[in-house]
């Protein structure tokens, strides 16, 4: 998984660096590429030393460096920031699954690299006024305990909704922020995809993202909260694909799984039943959409098969 994801990110970085006009953004992406390159080679060497077939991942055939700009206004760094969020989550998970000392060391180093660039991407976006800060709140002066089970209800006996707490707001805001970037990404993919089935899939994803943004936005608006979310960058008029349909489908697959994870955490830590139900219904839509994408990738030979655990085959 790490090899596939890293080779995908390297191809995307190559394109974004090629078309970048902002010198600071370009330097940040070049630094990340320089840090990731040797790690991909290290993983490849580990496979070779163990006699493992090296995954195909994504190669120069999956990127078109001659394609004009598809995105503008800071989208490159916004997407890189989201990809680093995904990386942080996966590295933490994979680190807890690793037992070999060299694998643990690899993921610790990848985690440090990712955290470093995530912080730099965030600082860049805020300095350029591309990424606004979430809403400010009044700091609590006392510590209280929940004493009434009605706290869990979306409404009380008078039909009044309990106001969101800061944890619930945080997950909803994060969902809005990441879905805006994801919607812009997938809209650009739909604009330039060559395969008609992939194009239809991306357009459906755009519609689902719009619905998620509307539903999450309504939860905040009903509490008189107006989130200053990022505009997500602009899409140009270019229809020339910078990436292969295979790469764009895989990137969408990663983003969908990231969205599912975020919504699961949000539902898990929310104490308001109506918010839990809303997030669960949205997660169901994303899950079904993700599975549709898997079918599209299988139909076109774009999804590599993970190594199997078939003991019967080994015995034969």
Image: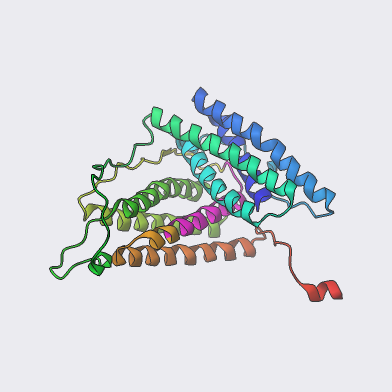
Q: Residue at x 60, y 42 (%)?
A: 111
Query: Is 3 on the left or on the right of 134, as rendered?
Result: right
In this picture, is 277 found above or below 5?
Answer: below
- Tell me which residue sits at (55%, 41%) in the image: 240
Q: Is residue 131 magenta?
A: no
**Residue 62 is at least partly visible in this image:** no
Q: Where is residue 207 in the image (x, y as percent from the top left)?
A: 39, 57
Please name the residue shown 51% across and 45% down the image.
Answer: 85
Q: Which of the image's four quarters has the C terminus?
A: bottom right
Which secondary structure type mostly characterizes the magenta part of the structure?
Answer: helix
> Residue 112, percent across and down?
59, 38
Outermost residue on the left side: it is 158
Relative side of 42 to 86, left or right: right
User: Residue 232 sits in which quadrant?
Assistant: top left
Above/below status of 235 relative to 190: above
Asked if the stretch drawn in magenta spans residue 243, the answer is yes
How many numbered callouts?
A: 0
Residue 60 falls in which quadrant of the image? top right
In this picture, which residue range is highlighted in magenta? 242-263
How are the residues colored? rainbow
Q: Kindly tell me whether residue 164 is visible in this rendering.
A: yes
Q: Which residue lies furthest to the right in this view?
A: 316
Q: Position of residue 90 (x, y in %)?
A: 58, 51
Residue 182 x, y percent position in the rendering: 45, 49
């Amino acid at each position: 998984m790490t090899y596939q994801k890293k080779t995908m990110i390297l191809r995307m970085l190559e394109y974004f660096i090629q078309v970048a006009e902002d010198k600071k953004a370009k330097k940040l992406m070049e630094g990340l590429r320089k840090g990731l390159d040797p790690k991909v080679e290290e993983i490849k060497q580990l496979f070779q030393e163990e006699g493992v077939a090296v995954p195909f991942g994504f190669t120069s055939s999956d990127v078109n460096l001659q394609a004009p700009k598809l995105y503008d206004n800071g989208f490159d760094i916004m997407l890189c920031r989201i990809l680093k969020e995904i990386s942080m989550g996966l590295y933490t998970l994979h680190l807890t699954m690793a037992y070999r000392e060299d694998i643990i060391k690899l993921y610790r180093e990848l985690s440090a690299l990712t955290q470093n660039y995530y912080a730099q991407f965030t600082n860049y976006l805020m300095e350029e006024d591309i990424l606004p800060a979430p809403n400010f709140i009044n700091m609590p002066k006392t510590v209280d305990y929940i004493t009434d089970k009605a706290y869990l209800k979306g409404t009380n006996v008078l039909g009044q909704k309990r106001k969101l707490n800061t944890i619930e707001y945080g997950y909803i805001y994060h969902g809005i922020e990441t879905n805006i970037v994801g919607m812009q990404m997938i809209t650009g993919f739909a604009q330039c995809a060559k395969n008609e089935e992939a194009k239809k899939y991306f357009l459906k994803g755009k519609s689902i993202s719009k619905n998620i943004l509307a539903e999450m936005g309504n939860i905040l608006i009903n509490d008189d909260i107006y989130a200053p979310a990022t505009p997500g960058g602009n899409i140009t008029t270019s229809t020339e694909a910078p990436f292969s349909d295979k790469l764009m489908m895989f990137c969408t697959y990663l983003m969908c799984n990231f969205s599912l994870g975020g919504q699961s955490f949000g539902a898990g830590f929310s104490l308001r039943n109506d918010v839990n139900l809303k997030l669960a219904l949205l997660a169901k839509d994303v899950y079904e959409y993700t599975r549709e994408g898997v079918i599209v990738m299988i139909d076109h030979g774009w999804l590599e098969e993970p190594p199997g655990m078939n003991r019967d085959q080994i015995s034969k």
